[in-house]
Image (cartoon, rainbow, N blue to C red):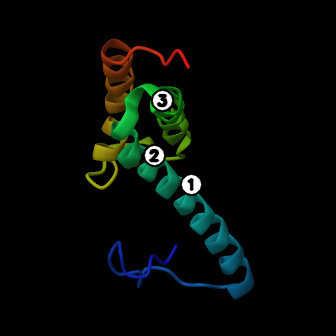
């Protein structure tokens, strides 16, 4: 997807069907909005961790995903552009889940 230049040049991308491209672009923007919502949850939740704990646990569980392993070429997972994200998903999210479960008691309200 073209990313408004936010991820570098997109000169490797040729659009054969503008309509199909715009449909996929719309889906990509939707997913970007979902990730923005999760990011906002992460920013707001320190205000009252006991209240946001269930939502954070859900977000951690959703981010922890083995979906990347469905790539047709597994060598891409070790690419420097992907490996940090993969480690954050597979190591960081479980660690955050454990930290939250041990440091914040569930809300009783």
57 relative to 68, above or below = above
Report which residue position mark 1 lands on. 34
Residue of label 2: 41
Question: Which of 30 and 71 lies nearest the eye of the viewer?
Answer: 30
The answer to whether marks 2 and 3 mark residues whose Cβ atoms lie closer than 8 Å is no
Residue drawn 33% across the image and 12% down it: 102
Q: CA distance from mark 2 to mark 3?
A: 12 Å
* Left or right: 6 in relation to 29: left
Q: Which disc is residue 17 wearing?
A: none
Counting residues from the start of the chain, the first of labels 2 and 3 encountered is 2
Give the distance between the C-alpha atoms of the residues marked 1 and 3, in whole angstroms.
21 Å
> Which quarter of the rendered picture does the C terminus lie within?
top right
Q: Which residue is mark 3?
A: 51
Q: Residue placed at 74% from the left, 84% from the top?
A: 19
Q: Nearer the viewer, mark 2 or mark 1?
A: 2
Give how far apart the Cα atoms at labels 2 and 1 are: 11 Å
Residue 70 percent coordinates (x, y): 56, 40
In the rendered image, is residue 89 in sight?
no
Question: Is residue 33 toward the left or the right of residue 79 in the image?
Answer: right
- Pointer 1: residues within 10 angstroms few (<14), some, or many (20+)? few
- Residue 59 visible, this angle: yes
């Amino acid at each position: 997807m073209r990313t408004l230049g936010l991820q570098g040049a997109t000169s490797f991308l040729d659009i054969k069907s503008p309509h199909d491209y715009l449909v996929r672009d719309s889906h990509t923007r939707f997913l970007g909005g979902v990730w923005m919502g999760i990011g906002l949850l992460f920013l707001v939740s320190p205000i009252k961790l006991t209240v946001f704990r269930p939502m954070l646990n859900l977000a951690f569980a959703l981010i922890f995903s083995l979906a990347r392993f469905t790539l047709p070429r597994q060598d891409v997972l070790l690419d420097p552009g992907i490996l940090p994200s993969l480690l954050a998903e597979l190591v960081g999210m479980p660690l955050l889940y454990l930290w939250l479960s041990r440091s914040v008691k569930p809300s009783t309200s």
